[in-house]
Image (cartoon, coloured by chain):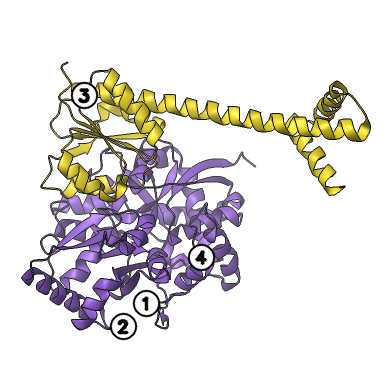
Chain colours: A purple, B yellow
Amino acid sequence: MSAPLQATVGFMPLLDCALLVAAHEAGIAARHGLALRLVRETSWANVRDRLAVGHFDAAQMLGPMVVAEALGLGPFRAPLLAPVSLGLGGNVITVSCELWSQMQVAGAAHGATPRTQAEALARVIARRMEQGQGALTLAMVFPYSCHHYQLRDWLALSGIDADRDVRLVVLPPSLLADALRLGQVDGFCAGEPWGSIAVDAGSGVIVALCNDMWEQPTEKVIGLRADRAERQPELVTALVRSVVDAARWASDARNRDALVGWLAEPRYVGARPALLHAALAGELRMAIDTAPVTRAGFLQLDVAATRPEPRYADLICEHMVRCGQVTDSAATRTRARAAFRNDLYSKALDTKEDN
Amino acid sequence: MREATLRVLIVDQNLLRAAVLEDGLREAGYRDIVVVRDMQNLMRRILDEEPDVILIDLENPNRDVLEQMFQVSRIVKKPVAMFVDQSDRSAIEAAIDAGVGAYVVDGLRKERVRAIVDMAISRFHAFDRLRTELDETRQQLVDRKLLDRAKGILMKQRGVTEDQAYELLRKTAMDANLKLAQVAQSVITAAELLK
Protein backbone atom coordinates (compact mmCIF):
# COMPACT_ATOMS: atom_id res chain seq x y z
CA MET A 1 0.00 0.00 0.00
CA SER A 2 1.34 3.42 -0.93
CA ALA A 3 2.02 6.13 1.63
CA PRO A 4 -1.14 8.03 2.58
CA LEU A 5 -1.89 11.25 0.76
CA GLN A 6 -1.76 14.31 2.97
CA ALA A 7 -4.22 17.13 2.48
CA THR A 8 -4.66 20.33 4.46
CA VAL A 9 -8.25 21.43 4.01
CA GLY A 10 -9.68 24.78 5.09
CA PHE A 11 -13.24 25.11 6.37
CA MET A 12 -15.58 27.65 7.95
CA PRO A 13 -17.62 27.03 11.12
CA LEU A 14 -20.90 26.21 9.39
CA LEU A 15 -23.20 23.22 9.49
CA ASP A 16 -22.20 22.21 5.99
CA CYS A 17 -18.62 21.46 6.95
CA ALA A 18 -20.32 18.30 8.27
CA LEU A 19 -19.16 15.97 5.50
CA LEU A 20 -15.54 17.06 5.88
CA VAL A 21 -15.71 16.56 9.62
CA ALA A 22 -17.35 13.16 9.19
CA ALA A 23 -14.77 12.12 6.58
CA HIS A 24 -12.03 12.97 9.03
CA GLU A 25 -13.43 11.96 12.41
CA ALA A 26 -15.17 8.75 11.34
CA GLY A 27 -11.99 7.52 9.67
CA ILE A 28 -13.57 7.56 6.20
CA ALA A 29 -10.80 9.59 4.53
CA ALA A 30 -8.16 7.35 6.11
CA ARG A 31 -9.82 4.35 4.47
CA HIS A 32 -9.29 6.08 1.13
CA GLY A 33 -5.61 6.61 1.92
CA LEU A 34 -6.14 10.29 2.72
CA ALA A 35 -4.76 11.92 5.86
CA LEU A 36 -6.84 15.07 6.35
CA ARG A 37 -5.75 18.06 8.37
CA LEU A 38 -8.76 20.35 8.82
CA VAL A 39 -8.02 24.02 9.45
CA ARG A 40 -10.77 26.32 10.67
CA GLU A 41 -10.76 29.73 9.02
CA THR A 42 -12.27 33.06 9.96
CA SER A 43 -13.13 34.56 6.59
CA TRP A 44 -14.00 33.38 3.10
CA ALA A 45 -11.36 35.71 1.69
CA ASN A 46 -8.74 33.87 3.75
CA VAL A 47 -9.98 30.51 2.50
CA ARG A 48 -9.65 31.71 -1.08
CA ASP A 49 -6.22 33.28 -0.61
CA ARG A 50 -4.73 30.39 1.31
CA LEU A 51 -5.98 28.01 -1.35
CA ALA A 52 -4.46 30.21 -4.05
CA VAL A 53 -1.01 30.38 -2.45
CA GLY A 54 -0.97 26.71 -1.54
CA HIS A 55 -1.42 26.78 2.25
CA PHE A 56 -4.51 24.67 1.63
CA ASP A 57 -4.64 21.72 -0.72
CA ALA A 58 -8.41 22.00 -0.86
CA ALA A 59 -11.14 23.88 0.99
CA GLN A 60 -14.82 24.08 1.75
CA MET A 61 -15.98 26.91 -0.48
CA LEU A 62 -19.09 28.74 -1.48
CA GLY A 63 -20.13 27.42 -4.90
CA PRO A 64 -20.24 30.97 -6.31
CA MET A 65 -16.67 31.65 -5.12
CA VAL A 66 -15.38 28.85 -7.32
CA VAL A 67 -17.38 30.21 -10.25
CA ALA A 68 -16.10 33.74 -9.56
CA GLU A 69 -12.51 32.52 -9.66
CA ALA A 70 -13.22 30.60 -12.87
CA LEU A 71 -14.48 33.86 -14.37
CA GLY A 72 -11.37 35.75 -13.25
CA LEU A 73 -13.26 37.92 -10.76
CA GLY A 74 -11.02 37.08 -7.79
CA PRO A 75 -7.75 38.81 -7.00
CA PHE A 76 -5.55 35.86 -7.90
CA ARG A 77 -6.91 34.54 -11.14
CA ALA A 78 -5.93 31.07 -10.02
CA PRO A 79 -8.52 28.88 -11.70
CA LEU A 80 -10.34 26.70 -9.21
CA LEU A 81 -12.56 23.73 -9.76
CA ALA A 82 -15.11 21.81 -7.73
CA PRO A 83 -15.03 18.02 -8.12
CA VAL A 84 -17.58 17.33 -5.38
CA SER A 85 -20.30 19.19 -3.52
CA LEU A 86 -20.66 19.31 0.28
CA GLY A 87 -24.42 19.63 0.38
CA LEU A 88 -27.48 21.49 -0.82
CA GLY A 89 -29.57 24.11 0.94
CA GLY A 90 -29.40 25.03 4.59
CA ASN A 91 -29.77 28.82 4.37
CA VAL A 92 -32.32 30.98 6.15
CA ILE A 93 -33.27 34.64 6.23
CA THR A 94 -33.54 36.10 9.71
CA VAL A 95 -34.71 39.57 10.79
CA SER A 96 -34.39 41.38 14.10
CA CYS A 97 -37.29 41.17 16.55
CA GLU A 98 -37.95 44.85 16.08
CA LEU A 99 -38.18 44.59 12.31
CA TRP A 100 -40.35 41.50 12.72
CA SER A 101 -42.90 43.35 14.82
CA GLN A 102 -43.06 46.09 12.20
CA MET A 103 -43.47 43.42 9.51
CA GLN A 104 -46.27 41.76 11.48
CA VAL A 105 -48.17 45.04 11.58
CA ALA A 106 -47.65 45.19 7.80
CA GLY A 107 -49.08 41.72 7.18
CA ALA A 108 -46.33 39.23 7.94
CA ALA A 109 -47.19 36.13 9.96
CA HIS A 110 -45.46 33.02 11.22
CA GLY A 111 -45.63 30.32 8.58
CA ALA A 112 -46.57 32.70 5.75
CA THR A 113 -44.96 32.27 2.34
CA PRO A 114 -41.66 34.03 1.56
CA ARG A 115 -43.62 36.33 -0.78
CA THR A 116 -46.07 37.41 1.93
CA GLN A 117 -43.17 38.14 4.28
CA ALA A 118 -41.34 40.09 1.57
CA GLU A 119 -44.49 42.11 0.80
CA ALA A 120 -44.74 43.03 4.45
CA LEU A 121 -41.11 44.13 4.38
CA ALA A 122 -41.83 46.27 1.31
CA ARG A 123 -44.60 48.06 3.24
CA VAL A 124 -42.26 48.61 6.18
CA ILE A 125 -39.65 50.07 3.84
CA ALA A 126 -42.21 52.32 2.13
CA ARG A 127 -43.33 53.66 5.49
CA ARG A 128 -39.77 54.24 6.62
CA MET A 129 -39.13 56.24 3.46
CA GLU A 130 -42.25 58.36 4.04
CA GLN A 131 -41.07 59.08 7.53
CA GLY A 132 -37.58 59.92 6.33
CA GLN A 133 -35.93 57.08 8.20
CA GLY A 134 -32.70 55.57 6.90
CA ALA A 135 -32.52 52.44 4.79
CA LEU A 136 -32.60 49.06 6.49
CA THR A 137 -29.29 47.20 6.63
CA LEU A 138 -29.32 43.58 5.52
CA ALA A 139 -26.29 41.33 5.73
CA MET A 140 -25.00 38.32 3.88
CA VAL A 141 -21.75 36.42 4.21
CA PHE A 142 -19.87 37.10 0.99
CA PRO A 143 -20.51 38.90 -2.31
CA TYR A 144 -20.12 35.64 -4.24
CA SER A 145 -22.52 33.50 -2.27
CA CYS A 146 -25.93 31.91 -2.69
CA HIS A 147 -26.91 33.82 0.46
CA HIS A 148 -26.40 37.05 -1.43
CA TYR A 149 -28.45 35.91 -4.42
CA GLN A 150 -31.16 34.34 -2.26
CA LEU A 151 -31.51 37.52 -0.25
CA ARG A 152 -31.91 39.48 -3.49
CA ASP A 153 -34.44 36.99 -4.82
CA TRP A 154 -36.46 37.23 -1.64
CA LEU A 155 -36.49 41.03 -1.76
CA ALA A 156 -37.40 40.93 -5.45
CA LEU A 157 -40.53 38.89 -4.65
CA SER A 158 -42.12 42.14 -3.52
CA GLY A 159 -40.25 44.43 -5.88
CA ILE A 160 -37.69 45.67 -3.33
CA ASP A 161 -34.57 46.89 -5.13
CA ALA A 162 -31.60 45.45 -3.25
CA ASP A 163 -29.30 48.21 -4.51
CA ARG A 164 -31.59 51.17 -3.86
CA ASP A 165 -34.14 50.36 -1.16
CA VAL A 166 -31.90 48.65 1.41
CA ARG A 167 -28.24 48.68 2.34
CA LEU A 168 -26.57 45.33 1.68
CA VAL A 169 -23.48 44.56 3.72
CA VAL A 170 -21.26 41.58 4.35
CA LEU A 171 -20.68 40.21 7.84
CA PRO A 172 -19.02 36.95 8.82
CA PRO A 173 -21.56 34.38 10.07
CA SER A 174 -20.15 34.22 13.57
CA LEU A 175 -20.82 37.95 14.12
CA LEU A 176 -24.36 38.01 12.72
CA ALA A 177 -26.36 37.12 15.81
CA ASP A 178 -24.61 39.81 17.86
CA ALA A 179 -24.94 42.40 15.11
CA LEU A 180 -28.68 41.69 14.96
CA ARG A 181 -29.03 42.03 18.72
CA LEU A 182 -27.10 45.29 18.77
CA GLY A 183 -29.16 46.71 15.91
CA GLN A 184 -26.17 47.01 13.56
CA VAL A 185 -28.06 44.98 11.00
CA ASP A 186 -31.81 44.53 10.61
CA GLY A 187 -31.66 41.13 8.99
CA PHE A 188 -29.41 38.62 7.31
CA CYS A 189 -29.22 35.58 5.10
CA ALA A 190 -26.81 32.90 6.32
CA GLY A 191 -26.27 29.18 6.54
CA GLU A 192 -27.39 27.34 9.62
CA PRO A 193 -26.89 27.22 12.56
CA TRP A 194 -26.48 31.01 12.56
CA GLY A 195 -30.16 31.87 12.02
CA SER A 196 -31.20 29.44 14.75
CA ILE A 197 -28.55 30.85 17.08
CA ALA A 198 -30.08 34.32 16.65
CA VAL A 199 -33.57 32.91 17.32
CA ASP A 200 -32.28 30.96 20.30
CA ALA A 201 -30.68 34.11 21.71
CA GLY A 202 -34.00 35.91 21.41
CA SER A 203 -32.59 38.45 18.98
CA GLY A 204 -34.21 37.41 15.72
CA VAL A 205 -37.00 35.67 13.84
CA ILE A 206 -36.50 33.45 10.79
CA VAL A 207 -38.78 34.78 8.04
CA ALA A 208 -37.84 32.55 5.12
CA LEU A 209 -36.14 29.26 4.39
CA CYS A 210 -34.20 29.63 1.16
CA ASN A 211 -35.25 26.12 0.10
CA ASP A 212 -38.76 27.48 -0.27
CA MET A 213 -37.54 29.86 -2.99
CA TRP A 214 -34.84 27.90 -4.79
CA GLU A 215 -35.86 24.45 -5.87
CA GLN A 216 -32.56 22.74 -5.19
CA PRO A 217 -30.11 25.29 -3.90
CA THR A 218 -26.48 24.43 -4.35
CA GLU A 219 -24.34 25.54 -1.45
CA LYS A 220 -20.79 24.56 -0.53
CA VAL A 221 -18.33 22.58 -2.59
CA ILE A 222 -14.80 21.31 -2.26
CA GLY A 223 -12.65 23.75 -4.18
CA LEU A 224 -9.12 23.16 -5.30
CA ARG A 225 -6.72 24.69 -7.75
CA ALA A 226 -7.14 23.41 -11.27
CA ASP A 227 -3.39 22.97 -11.76
CA ARG A 228 -3.16 21.01 -8.53
CA ALA A 229 -6.04 18.77 -9.54
CA GLU A 230 -4.33 18.07 -12.83
CA ARG A 231 -0.98 17.35 -11.22
CA GLN A 232 -2.39 15.10 -8.52
CA PRO A 233 -5.52 13.35 -9.82
CA GLU A 234 -5.27 10.80 -7.00
CA LEU A 235 -5.94 13.61 -4.52
CA VAL A 236 -9.14 14.53 -6.37
CA THR A 237 -10.22 10.91 -6.43
CA ALA A 238 -9.55 10.43 -2.71
CA LEU A 239 -11.41 13.65 -1.83
CA VAL A 240 -14.45 12.73 -3.93
CA ARG A 241 -14.65 9.21 -2.53
CA SER A 242 -14.17 10.41 1.04
CA VAL A 243 -16.93 13.01 0.77
CA VAL A 244 -19.33 10.61 -0.96
CA ASP A 245 -18.76 7.92 1.67
CA ALA A 246 -19.10 10.57 4.38
CA ALA A 247 -22.48 11.48 2.86
CA ARG A 248 -23.52 7.83 3.00
CA TRP A 249 -22.37 7.70 6.61
CA ALA A 250 -24.06 10.97 7.58
CA SER A 251 -27.37 9.85 6.02
CA ASP A 252 -27.56 6.98 8.49
CA ALA A 253 -29.64 8.25 11.40
CA ARG A 254 -27.62 6.11 13.80
CA ASN A 255 -24.60 8.29 13.16
CA ARG A 256 -26.37 11.58 13.80
CA ASP A 257 -25.42 11.86 17.47
CA ALA A 258 -21.73 11.29 16.75
CA LEU A 259 -21.79 13.86 13.96
CA VAL A 260 -23.53 16.48 16.10
CA GLY A 261 -21.10 15.76 18.92
CA TRP A 262 -18.12 16.62 16.73
CA LEU A 263 -19.74 19.65 15.10
CA ALA A 264 -20.69 21.09 18.48
CA GLU A 265 -17.02 21.23 19.51
CA PRO A 266 -15.44 24.69 19.39
CA ARG A 267 -12.78 23.51 16.95
CA TYR A 268 -15.53 22.88 14.38
CA VAL A 269 -18.80 24.85 14.55
CA GLY A 270 -19.10 25.42 18.29
CA ALA A 271 -22.86 25.60 18.81
CA ARG A 272 -25.45 24.00 21.06
CA PRO A 273 -26.01 20.37 19.97
CA ALA A 274 -29.79 20.81 20.09
CA LEU A 275 -29.61 23.57 17.45
CA LEU A 276 -27.37 21.48 15.20
CA HIS A 277 -29.66 18.45 15.58
CA ALA A 278 -32.70 20.52 14.67
CA ALA A 279 -31.11 22.07 11.59
CA LEU A 280 -29.80 18.69 10.38
CA ALA A 281 -33.28 17.22 10.83
CA GLY A 282 -34.89 20.17 9.06
CA GLU A 283 -36.92 21.10 12.14
CA LEU A 284 -36.50 24.81 12.51
CA ARG A 285 -37.80 27.03 15.21
CA MET A 286 -38.62 30.25 13.34
CA ALA A 287 -39.19 32.27 16.52
CA ILE A 288 -38.42 31.59 20.12
CA ASP A 289 -42.11 31.22 21.02
CA THR A 290 -43.35 29.12 18.09
CA ALA A 291 -43.29 25.39 17.45
CA PRO A 292 -40.64 24.19 14.97
CA VAL A 293 -41.60 23.80 11.33
CA THR A 294 -40.42 20.74 9.46
CA ARG A 295 -38.81 20.79 6.02
CA ALA A 296 -37.54 17.47 4.75
CA GLY A 297 -34.25 17.97 2.95
CA PHE A 298 -33.68 21.45 4.36
CA LEU A 299 -29.98 20.73 4.38
CA GLN A 300 -29.30 17.84 2.04
CA LEU A 301 -26.14 15.95 2.93
CA ASP A 302 -26.89 12.65 1.21
CA VAL A 303 -25.00 11.06 -1.67
CA ALA A 304 -27.27 12.67 -4.27
CA ALA A 305 -26.30 16.09 -2.91
CA THR A 306 -22.59 15.55 -3.54
CA ARG A 307 -22.67 15.61 -7.34
CA PRO A 308 -21.35 18.95 -8.65
CA GLU A 309 -23.96 19.39 -11.37
CA PRO A 310 -22.97 21.99 -13.98
CA ARG A 311 -26.54 23.31 -13.88
CA TYR A 312 -25.69 24.74 -10.45
CA ALA A 313 -23.00 26.77 -12.16
CA ASP A 314 -25.62 27.94 -14.69
CA LEU A 315 -27.86 29.09 -11.87
CA ILE A 316 -25.01 30.90 -10.11
CA CYS A 317 -23.91 32.54 -13.35
CA GLU A 318 -27.46 33.74 -14.00
CA HIS A 319 -27.54 35.43 -10.60
CA MET A 320 -24.10 36.96 -11.03
CA VAL A 321 -25.29 38.54 -14.25
CA ARG A 322 -28.53 39.73 -12.67
CA CYS A 323 -26.76 41.59 -9.87
CA GLY A 324 -24.10 43.02 -12.14
CA GLN A 325 -21.08 41.01 -10.98
CA VAL A 326 -20.36 39.83 -14.51
CA THR A 327 -21.54 40.56 -18.04
CA ASP A 328 -23.54 37.88 -19.74
CA SER A 329 -22.03 36.07 -22.70
CA ALA A 330 -21.85 32.55 -24.05
CA ALA A 331 -18.16 32.43 -23.11
CA THR A 332 -18.93 33.44 -19.53
CA ARG A 333 -21.51 30.73 -19.18
CA THR A 334 -19.17 28.11 -20.63
CA ARG A 335 -16.36 29.07 -18.28
CA ALA A 336 -18.67 29.07 -15.26
CA ARG A 337 -19.95 25.63 -16.20
CA ALA A 338 -16.43 24.28 -16.53
CA ALA A 339 -15.76 24.95 -12.83
CA PHE A 340 -18.22 22.29 -11.66
CA ARG A 341 -16.51 19.06 -12.61
CA ASN A 342 -19.16 16.42 -12.84
CA ASP A 343 -16.73 14.41 -14.99
CA LEU A 344 -14.07 14.20 -12.27
CA TYR A 345 -16.77 13.19 -9.80
CA SER A 346 -17.99 10.38 -12.05
CA LYS A 347 -14.47 9.26 -12.83
CA ALA A 348 -13.53 9.02 -9.15
CA LEU A 349 -16.55 6.84 -8.44
CA ASP A 350 -16.53 4.78 -11.64
CA THR A 351 -13.02 3.53 -11.14
CA LYS A 352 -13.70 2.53 -7.59
CA GLU A 353 -13.52 -1.21 -8.32
CA ASP A 354 -9.98 -0.89 -9.69
CA ASN A 355 -8.45 -0.53 -6.24
CA MET B 1 9.32 62.83 3.03
CA ARG B 2 7.94 61.62 -0.26
CA GLU B 3 5.38 59.13 1.08
CA ALA B 4 4.22 61.00 4.13
CA THR B 5 1.10 61.95 2.23
CA LEU B 6 -0.22 58.42 2.03
CA ARG B 7 -2.91 57.73 4.60
CA VAL B 8 -2.58 54.26 6.12
CA LEU B 9 -5.39 52.62 8.06
CA ILE B 10 -4.56 49.68 10.33
CA VAL B 11 -7.35 47.25 11.28
CA ASP B 12 -6.13 44.90 13.98
CA GLN B 13 -7.89 43.37 16.95
CA ASN B 14 -4.54 42.90 18.64
CA LEU B 15 -3.71 46.32 20.06
CA LEU B 16 -0.09 45.46 20.80
CA ARG B 17 0.57 44.31 17.27
CA ALA B 18 -1.18 47.37 15.85
CA ALA B 19 1.10 49.54 17.99
CA VAL B 20 4.21 47.69 16.81
CA LEU B 21 3.17 48.25 13.21
CA GLU B 22 2.24 51.87 13.76
CA ASP B 23 5.65 52.55 15.35
CA GLY B 24 7.42 50.99 12.41
CA LEU B 25 5.51 53.09 9.93
CA ARG B 26 6.14 56.29 11.88
CA GLU B 27 9.85 55.52 12.07
CA ALA B 28 9.83 55.08 8.31
CA GLY B 29 8.39 58.55 7.93
CA TYR B 30 4.67 57.91 7.48
CA ARG B 31 2.72 60.49 9.40
CA ASP B 32 -0.86 59.83 8.47
CA ILE B 33 -1.75 56.62 10.27
CA VAL B 34 -5.13 55.64 11.69
CA VAL B 35 -5.63 52.57 13.86
CA VAL B 36 -9.16 51.17 13.98
CA ARG B 37 -10.06 49.17 17.04
CA ASP B 38 -13.82 49.30 16.92
CA MET B 39 -14.80 46.60 14.45
CA GLN B 40 -18.48 47.40 14.75
CA ASN B 41 -18.23 50.60 12.80
CA LEU B 42 -15.47 49.52 10.49
CA MET B 43 -17.23 50.55 7.31
CA ARG B 44 -18.21 53.95 8.66
CA ARG B 45 -14.64 54.62 9.72
CA ILE B 46 -13.23 53.68 6.35
CA LEU B 47 -15.75 55.92 4.61
CA ASP B 48 -14.81 58.78 6.91
CA GLU B 49 -11.05 58.32 6.79
CA GLU B 50 -10.66 57.64 3.07
CA PRO B 51 -7.36 55.77 3.48
CA ASP B 52 -5.00 55.06 0.58
CA VAL B 53 -3.80 51.81 2.08
CA ILE B 54 -5.62 49.49 4.48
CA LEU B 55 -3.75 46.82 6.43
CA ILE B 56 -5.79 44.12 8.19
CA ASP B 57 -4.77 41.11 10.25
CA LEU B 58 -5.90 37.94 8.57
CA GLU B 59 -7.29 36.46 11.80
CA ASN B 60 -9.91 39.15 11.59
CA PRO B 61 -13.32 37.88 10.45
CA ASN B 62 -14.08 41.39 9.24
CA ARG B 63 -11.91 40.80 6.23
CA ASP B 64 -14.96 39.65 4.30
CA VAL B 65 -16.59 42.95 5.19
CA LEU B 66 -13.82 44.78 3.35
CA GLU B 67 -14.00 42.47 0.35
CA GLN B 68 -17.61 43.32 -0.33
CA MET B 69 -17.31 46.95 0.52
CA PHE B 70 -14.66 47.47 -2.11
CA GLN B 71 -16.62 45.52 -4.63
CA VAL B 72 -19.84 47.46 -4.45
CA SER B 73 -18.92 50.80 -3.04
CA ARG B 74 -19.58 53.76 -5.23
CA ILE B 75 -18.93 56.25 -2.45
CA VAL B 76 -15.33 55.62 -1.43
CA LYS B 77 -12.26 55.77 -3.55
CA LYS B 78 -12.15 52.19 -4.59
CA PRO B 79 -9.47 50.10 -2.90
CA VAL B 80 -8.59 46.74 -4.36
CA ALA B 81 -6.86 43.73 -2.89
CA MET B 82 -3.13 44.18 -2.90
CA PHE B 83 -1.12 43.52 -6.05
CA VAL B 84 -3.69 41.78 -8.10
CA ASP B 85 -1.40 40.95 -10.95
CA GLN B 86 0.49 37.71 -10.98
CA SER B 87 3.91 39.34 -11.11
CA ASP B 88 3.67 40.08 -7.42
CA ARG B 89 2.77 36.60 -6.38
CA SER B 90 5.75 36.33 -4.01
CA ALA B 91 4.69 39.51 -2.19
CA ILE B 92 1.18 38.15 -1.76
CA GLU B 93 2.52 34.86 -0.45
CA ALA B 94 4.82 36.63 1.99
CA ALA B 95 1.93 38.73 3.29
CA ILE B 96 -0.38 35.76 3.73
CA ASP B 97 2.39 33.83 5.45
CA ALA B 98 2.87 36.70 7.85
CA GLY B 99 -0.89 36.98 8.43
CA VAL B 100 -1.48 40.43 7.02
CA GLY B 101 -3.77 41.53 4.22
CA ALA B 102 -3.48 44.79 2.34
CA TYR B 103 -5.92 46.81 0.30
CA VAL B 104 -4.75 49.68 -1.80
CA VAL B 105 -6.71 52.41 -3.49
CA ASP B 106 -7.07 51.61 -7.14
CA GLY B 107 -4.67 53.43 -9.40
CA LEU B 108 -1.99 53.97 -6.78
CA ARG B 109 1.36 52.92 -8.17
CA LYS B 110 2.64 49.69 -6.66
CA GLU B 111 6.07 51.03 -5.86
CA ARG B 112 4.51 53.66 -3.62
CA VAL B 113 2.89 51.11 -1.34
CA ARG B 114 5.34 48.26 -1.57
CA ALA B 115 7.41 49.66 1.31
CA ILE B 116 4.34 49.87 3.53
CA VAL B 117 3.38 46.30 2.83
CA ASP B 118 6.95 45.08 3.36
CA MET B 119 7.03 46.94 6.64
CA ALA B 120 3.77 45.30 7.72
CA ILE B 121 5.11 41.87 6.82
CA SER B 122 8.34 42.31 8.80
CA ARG B 123 6.52 43.81 11.82
CA PHE B 124 4.00 40.97 11.85
CA HIS B 125 6.86 38.48 11.82
CA ALA B 126 8.67 40.38 14.56
CA PHE B 127 5.49 40.37 16.62
CA ASP B 128 5.13 36.62 16.14
CA ARG B 129 8.69 36.08 17.34
CA LEU B 130 8.00 38.24 20.38
CA ARG B 131 4.86 36.28 21.10
CA THR B 132 6.72 32.96 20.78
CA GLU B 133 9.49 34.15 23.07
CA LEU B 134 6.97 35.37 25.60
CA ASP B 135 5.15 32.03 25.52
CA GLU B 136 8.42 30.18 25.99
CA THR B 137 9.44 32.37 28.90
CA ARG B 138 6.07 31.87 30.53
CA GLN B 139 6.33 28.12 30.05
CA GLN B 140 9.83 28.10 31.55
CA LEU B 141 8.53 29.90 34.61
CA VAL B 142 5.73 27.39 35.02
CA ASP B 143 8.13 24.49 34.56
CA ARG B 144 10.48 25.98 37.11
CA LYS B 145 7.73 26.22 39.69
CA LEU B 146 6.69 22.61 39.08
CA LEU B 147 10.27 21.46 39.46
CA ASP B 148 10.70 23.31 42.74
CA ARG B 149 7.51 21.82 44.16
CA ALA B 150 8.46 18.29 43.07
CA LYS B 151 11.93 18.66 44.56
CA GLY B 152 10.39 19.80 47.84
CA ILE B 153 8.11 16.77 47.94
CA LEU B 154 10.99 14.36 47.32
CA MET B 155 13.23 16.04 49.87
CA LYS B 156 10.54 15.75 52.51
CA GLN B 157 9.30 12.25 51.74
CA ARG B 158 12.60 10.58 50.88
CA GLY B 159 14.90 12.61 53.08
CA VAL B 160 17.28 13.58 50.25
CA THR B 161 19.12 16.83 49.52
CA GLU B 162 17.96 19.24 46.85
CA ASP B 163 20.69 18.10 44.46
CA GLN B 164 19.77 14.46 44.98
CA ALA B 165 16.09 15.23 44.41
CA TYR B 166 16.93 16.99 41.18
CA GLU B 167 19.14 14.10 40.05
CA LEU B 168 16.35 11.63 40.78
CA LEU B 169 13.87 13.61 38.71
CA ARG B 170 16.33 14.06 35.87
CA LYS B 171 17.23 10.36 35.69
CA THR B 172 13.57 9.30 35.81
CA ALA B 173 12.77 11.72 33.00
CA MET B 174 15.64 10.42 30.90
CA ASP B 175 14.80 6.78 31.45
CA ALA B 176 11.14 7.30 30.66
CA ASN B 177 11.91 9.65 27.78
CA LEU B 178 9.79 12.39 29.32
CA LYS B 179 10.32 16.05 29.94
CA LEU B 180 11.54 17.05 33.38
CA ALA B 181 8.40 19.13 33.90
CA GLN B 182 6.20 16.12 33.08
CA VAL B 183 7.89 13.98 35.71
CA ALA B 184 7.69 16.83 38.20
CA GLN B 185 3.95 17.14 37.49
CA SER B 186 3.52 13.38 38.08
CA VAL B 187 5.28 13.63 41.44
CA ILE B 188 3.02 16.50 42.46
CA THR B 189 -0.12 14.69 41.30
CA ALA B 190 0.91 11.51 43.10
CA ALA B 191 1.68 13.40 46.29
CA GLU B 192 -1.73 15.05 46.17
CA LEU B 193 -3.44 11.69 45.72
CA LEU B 194 -1.58 10.21 48.66
CA LYS B 195 -2.22 13.11 50.97
Q: Position of residue A216 (x, y in %)?
A: 33, 70
Q: Tag 1 or tag 4, which sits nearer the N-term?
A: 4
Task: Identify which amino acid the numbered label 2 is placed on.
Answer: His
Q: Could you tell which of marks 2 and 1 lies nearer the N-terminus? A: 2
Tell me the residue that label 2 is attached to: A110
Disc 4 versus disc 3: nearer the observer: 3
Give, as a three-letter code, the residue at label 1. Answer: Ala
Q: Chain of mark 2?
A: A
Q: Please provide percent x and percent y for residue B126.
A: 43, 24
- Viewer-proximal residue, B72 or A287? A287
Q: Is residue B122 left or right of residue B75?
A: right
Report the residue at 18% width, 69% height from top.
Answer: A155
* Most foreground residue, A302 or A298: A298
**Circle 4 sits on which residue?**
A272
For mark 1, name the chain.
A
What is the distance, in whole Å, between disc 2 and disc 3 at their CAs? 55 Å
Q: Residue at x 86, y 47 (%)?
A: B195
Check residue B31 in the rendering and tell me which mark sits there, or answer none.
Answer: 3
Disc assigned to residue A287? 1
* Foreground residue among A103 and B97: A103
Could you confirm whether marks 4 and 2 are on the same chain?
A: yes
Dot 4: few (<14), some (14–19), or many (≥20) neighbours within 10 Å?
some
Q: Secondary structure at mark 2?
A: loop
Q: Residue at x 49, y 67 (%)?
A: A276
Amino acid bearing label 4: Arg
Which element type, helix, strand or loop, lies under badge 3? loop
